[in-house]
Image (spheres, coloured by chain):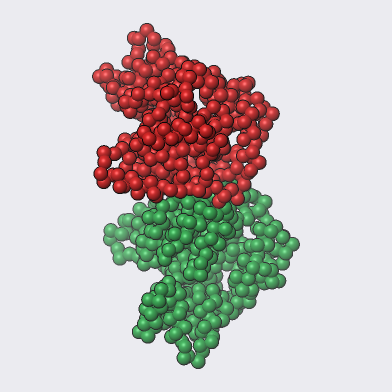
Chain colours: A green, B red
Amino acid sequence: MKVLGLIVEYNPFHNGHKYHIKQAKKIVNPDYTVAVMSGNFVQRGEPAIIDKYARTEIALQNGIDLLLELPFVYSIQDAGGFALGSIGTLHRSKVVTDIIFGSESGDIEIMNEIAHILLYQPGKFKKYIKYHLKEGHSYPNARKKALYDYFEKDDKKDIIYKIIEKSNDILGIEYLKNSKLYNTNIHLNCIKRKSADYNEENYTGEISSATAIRKIILDENYKLLEKTIPETSYQKILQEINDGKGPISYENMRDIILYKTRITPKEELIKIYGVKEGLEKRIIESAQRSSDLSELLANIKTKRFTYTRIKRTILNIIFDITDEKIQKFNEYGPQYIRVLGFNKKGKELLNQMKNKVKLPIITTPSRYIKILNEIRKKELSEDIIVHSDMFLEQFNYDIKASEIYSLLYQNKENSKKYNELTRQIIIK
Amino acid sequence: MKVLGLIVEYNPFHNGHKYHIKQAKKIVNPDYTVAVMSGNFVQRGEPAIIDKYARTEIALQNGIDLLLELPFVYSIQDAGGFALGSIGTLHRSKVVTDIIFGSESGDIEIMNEIAHILLYQPGKFKKYIKYHLKEGHSYPNARKKALYDYFEKDDKKDIIYKIIEKSNDILGIEYLKNSKLYNTNIHLNCIKRKSADYNEENYTGEISSATAIRKIILDENYKLLEKTIPETSYQKILQEINDGKGPISYENMRDIILYKTRITPKEELIKIYGVKEGLEKRIIESAQRSSDLSELLANIKTKRFTYTRIKRTILNIIFDITDEKIQKFNEYGPQYIRVLGFNKKGKELLNQMKNKVKLPIITTPSRYIKILNEIRKKELSEDIIVHSDMFLEQFNYDIKASEIYSLLYQNKENSKKYNELTRQIIIK
C-alpha cells in the first residue's frame, strides 16, 4: 500500500497546489493521500486568510483524502520547527510511505547532502559555525555562512549557494534532516515547483504566488482571483466572505498585537521564544510609536531580523510561547494526531491508522479530557512517547489559537458562534 | 489662605459639575481651587470618553486652578481604594484646607458616624461582619449587612439605610474614613448634589447624569448635548471628535479585552486583584461565548458581582494588577503628585506646594528617571514616605494606561502621535 503524505498550508489553495498534488500522485501512484496542514495560523507568522475548516473542505475537494492539523506550536516556528512538527506528524501517523515536497531547485541529492551536514555537523563545519558566531552573527546566519564556507571549493558550489537561499529548498532540507532525526521509513522526494516565487507579491497569471492571491482577495478583485485558484477554492472563499468570516488579514490583529507589545514588560518579553539579540528593545520601542502593524514591523525591522522572523516572534508573544516551552515541544515532537477532515477513502485510511498509531487520534476535540486520562493511565505502566503534560500543553495551544482567531472574523458575531471544542470535523 | 480641594472625574464635565464648583466655592470662599482627577480610565472600570488632557483643559476653563492626576492604580479601585488615592493626593499636596464633595443625602454627620464605625470597628459591628462572612457573603456585602444590623434600633435608621445604598454617599463615607486614616487637617464637608441620579441613563434636562451625557455623545446627538454641558466643554468635546480622538467607548476595547480574557490561564487570573469567589471561572467561560463586551459583561454578571465591579476587575486583568500589588499600593498611598495642568493662579499654588510637599511633583513625565534617582538618594538617608520601587511601579501604570488608551482613539494614526512621556502639560 502506498500512502502519499504532503505538508501544506493552503493559504489559500491555488492552481500551484493543484499542480503539485497531480505531479506527486503521478510519481507515487498512491492508494491514499494525506496532508498535514497548518491550522489557523501559518508559518509566515500570520493568521490564515480563511479558517482551517474552510481550507480543509477545499483540500478534500482537490485530491486530499485525509487532513491532519499541524499543532499550532510547530506551525509558527522557523523551517526547523515547522519540519519537526510536520514530518513528526506524518511519521507518527504510521501509514505514510512517501512524502513529496515542492522545491525551487528540485535537486534532492544536494538537499540531502546539506541536510546530512546540518544534522551530523562534521568538524570543519562546526569550526565555521563557531567562527561566525564569534563574529557576532545570529545562529541561523552563522549556520548559513558556515555552509557557504564548507562548500567553497565544491564543484556544485553555485547550485548549493542558490539552494540555501530559497525558502522552499530550505524547508525541504529541514524535512530531510528531520526525517533522519525521526529515523523514519518514509521515502522523501521533491518536485520542482511550477509556480511563482513564494514571495512574489503580484499576479503572475494562472500560477500566482499565495502572497499575490491573498492580496487579490483583500483587494476584492474577484475576477482576477478566479483565474488563480480552482473553482472549488473560489466558491468556498466567496462563501466564507459572505458568511462574515474571511478574509482575515494580519491587520485584523492590530489592537491585540499593539496592546500586547505595549503592555508586556521587558523581563517577560525576554522569556519568549525568538526574543533575543536585542529584539525585545526594538519591539518595546517600536510598539509605542506605531499606529498599525505594517508600521510596527517596519519599525522593528533591521538587517538582522527578517519580517517573517519578526511576525513569528510576535505571535509567540501573543500566545506566551516561551523559549523553555519550545525546547520541550521540539524535544518530544507532536503528541497527538488531530484530524480536521476526510472523505470516504480518508476514513478507511484513518481506520487503518487507528490500529497502528501510538499517539492519541483526536477527532472530537471536546473529548480531550477523556484522552488525557487514558494517557495518564498508560503513563503509569508502558514505554511511552506521549506525555500527558505535553499533550495538554500542545492541545491547549491549538484551542487558544482558534479562540483568538475567531475574534478576527469580519462579522464579530462569529466570534462566539464557532467554538473550537464543539466544532464538527469536515466529512466529504 | 483657603484652598478648596475637589475629587473629580469630569467624564465629561457637565452642568452638574459646574453647579458643584460654584456651591463649593460659596461655602469655602477659597483663594485657590485644586482638583484631583482620574486619568484616562475611570472608576466605573472604563476608558474616559475623552482623554485626560482634554478634560484638564475644560476643567481649567470652568473654575479649577490646578489639576492633579489620581494615579491609575487608585482610579480604577472600588470606593475605598479610590478614596485612599484621592484623599491621599490632596492631603499630601500639603496646601488643601477644605474638601467639598457631592452627596445624595448631604448629611455629613451621619456619614461621619458611619465612617467612624467602618474605621474603628466597634466589637458589636465586628461580630456582625463575622456572622455575615460566615453566611457566605463577600466582604463588601457582609460589611453593608453589618451596618444594617448595627443601626437596626437607631432613630435615624431610615436615613442611614438610604445613605449606605447611594453611590456618592458611599464614596463620601470613604473620603471621611480615609481622611481620618491620613490624620489630615483638611476640613471635609459635603453638599447635596443637584443632579440626576449617577446611574440615570436618560436625558433629564439641563442637569443630566454623566452616564446619560456619554450616551448622548456616542449617539452623536449634539443638539441635546449642548443643553447638558457648558459651552467650553461642548466645544472641546467636538474638537476631540474632529481630531479623531474621542469619543472613546468601552466597546473600543473589544479586541483587547476578549483577547486577554480568552488567553489568560486560570492560574494567572486568580492572582489578579478582584478575581475571587469564582469570578475567574465565570470570566473564562464567558469570554469564549461572547462576541462583544456588553455580551461579555452580561454573561459574567451574577447577583454577587455588580457590573462596575466586573468592569474594574477586567481592567485589572488587562493591566495585570495583582492582589499583591494593590495591597502594597494601598498600604503606602500615592507616591507622587502628577500635575496635568494649571492656570496663572494654579501656578502660584504649585509654587507654594513645591516648598511644602514631601512627594515628588511630576510636571514633565519624561524626567521621571531623574526624579527616581533623587528618591533613591534620599532613601539612603532620610525618614521617607516615598519608596523608589513603589514610585516607579505606580508611575509605570500611568504610562501604560495612556499607551493602551491611545490605541482606542478613533483615528488610529493618533495612537503614535500622543506619547505620554513627551506630552505637554496644559497651561491656560
- Residue B309, given in percent of the width and then of the height, sits at 44, 33
Residue A76 position (above or below residue B209): below
Task: Give the camera-side residue of A170 and B81.
Answer: B81
- Residue B103, given in percent of the width and then of the height, sits at 47, 20
**Residue B381 visible in the displayed image:** yes
Residue in the picture at 52% in, 29% down = B64
Considering every residue shown, the one lying at the far top of the view is: B155
Quadrant housing the C terminus of chain A: bottom right
**Across the whole image, how many numbered discs are drawn on residues?**
0
Residue B135 position (above or below residue A380): above
Task: Give the camera-side residue of A154 and B62.
Answer: B62
Task: Give the camera-side residue of B149 and A399.
Answer: B149
Q: Is residue A104 left or right of residue B163?
A: right
Residue in the picture at 26% in, 38% down = B383
Residue A296 position (above or below residue B374): below
- Residue A389, given in percent of the width and then of the height, sits at 35, 56
Residue in the picture at 33% in, 24% down = B180
**Residue B77 visible in the displayed image:** no
Residue in the picture at 43% in, 41% down = B362
Q: In this view, does A223 lie to the left or right of B213?
A: right
- Residue A2, given in percent of the width and then of the height, sits at 51, 75
